[in-house]
Image (cartoon, rainbow, N blue to C red):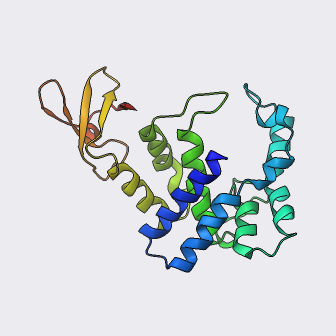
């Protein structure tokens, strides 16, 4: 699955940015590749449903975390990989599933996989919706990231991801095209130059203008 590969790559990048050693990076890569293995036990009519899931269908989807742990538990695989399959939908404030764990029960590798999983899921095109603009996803993370995600990794991740778009052309919500030139402490609203006249626009100071799409 492309999603699992993407999660593996993004999660490893987070580990690199955090200065983790090669052995730990390899653990993270494997956890990313196998985090969603439990979805093989979810019926396709639910997993690939083009419309919104019912409450009952979502309860079935949620079981993929436990299924993943059970599948991996049959093999000689690192415990961190099994835990990532089980816990990658847990949130630090207890709002996740399958157990509603809080920060003290969520290990670092699972926490890293969670960030990578959410980012890729929201920015990727799915059968039921188009992918979101990366800066809208970053804004969502900014809104509840401190409470839901590992504080050691989420701020660093947002800064690095936002900075990776420096030099990229974007479409603003006012219809104008611009180039990102600087990332401020408000990562979802970087500073840009308008392509029409090279004037500078500091989006963190603009209430009604933000990035609509990366071109």
Q: Where is residue 168 in the image (x, y as percent from the top left)?
A: 29, 40
Q: Position of residue 144 (x, y in %)?
A: 53, 50
> In the image, what residue occupies the spot 88% across and 69% down?
74
Q: Position of residue 15 (x, y in %)?
A: 49, 68
> Is 3 located above or below residue 93 in the figure?
above
Q: Where is residue 200 in the image (x, y as percent from the top left)?
A: 15, 36
Q: Report if residue 108 is visible in the image.
A: no
Q: Report if residue 113 is visible in the image.
A: yes
Q: Residue 122 or 207: which is nearer the viewer?
A: 122
Q: Residue 207 or 199: which is nearer the viewer?
A: 199
> In the image, what residue occupies the spot 65% across and 72% down?
107
> In the image, what residue occupies the spot 76% across and 62% down?
86
Q: Which residue lies furthest to the top in this view?
A: 175
Asked where in the image residue 35 lies, by quadrant, the reply is bottom right
Q: Is residue 67 left or right of residue 179?
A: right
> Is 191 located above or below residue 15 in the figure?
above
Q: In this view, does 74 lie to the left or right of 150?
A: right
Q: In which quarter of the image is the C terminus?
A: top left
> In the image, what residue occupies the spot 67% across and 29% down?
127
Asked where in the image residue 78 lies, by quadrant, the reply is bottom right
Q: Residue 126 or 52: which is nearer the viewer?
A: 126
Asked where in the image residue 147 lies, by quadrant, the reply is bottom right
> Is 154 located above or below residue 203 in the figure?
below
């Amino acid at each position: 699955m492309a999603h699992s590969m993407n999660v593996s790559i993004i999660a490893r990048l987070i580990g690199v940015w955090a200065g983790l050693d090669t052995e730990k990076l390899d653990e993270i890569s494997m956890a990313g590749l196998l985090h969603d293995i439990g979805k093989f036990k979810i019926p396709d009519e639910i997993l690939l449903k083009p419309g919104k899931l019912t409450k009952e269908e979502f309860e079935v989807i949620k079981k993929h975390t436990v299924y993943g742990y059970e599948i991996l538990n049959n093999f000689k695989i690192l415990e961190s990989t099994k835990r990532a399959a089980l816990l990658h939908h847990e949130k630090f404030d207890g709002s996740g599933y399958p157990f509603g764990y809080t920060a003290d029960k969520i290990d670092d590798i699972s926490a890293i996989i969670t960030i990578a999983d959410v980012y890729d899921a929201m920015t990727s095109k799915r059968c039921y919706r188009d992918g979101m603009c990366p800066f809208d996803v970053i804004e969502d993370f900014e809104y509840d990231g401190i409470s839901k995600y590992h504080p050691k990794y989420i701020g660093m991740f947002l800064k690095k991801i936002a900075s990776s778009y420096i030099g990229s052309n974007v479409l603003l919500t006012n219809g104008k095209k611009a180039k990102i030139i600087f990332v401020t402490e408000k990562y979802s609203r970087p500073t840009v130059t308008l392509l029409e006249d090279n004037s500078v626009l500091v989006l963190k100071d603009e209430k009604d203008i933000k990035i609509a799409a990366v071109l």
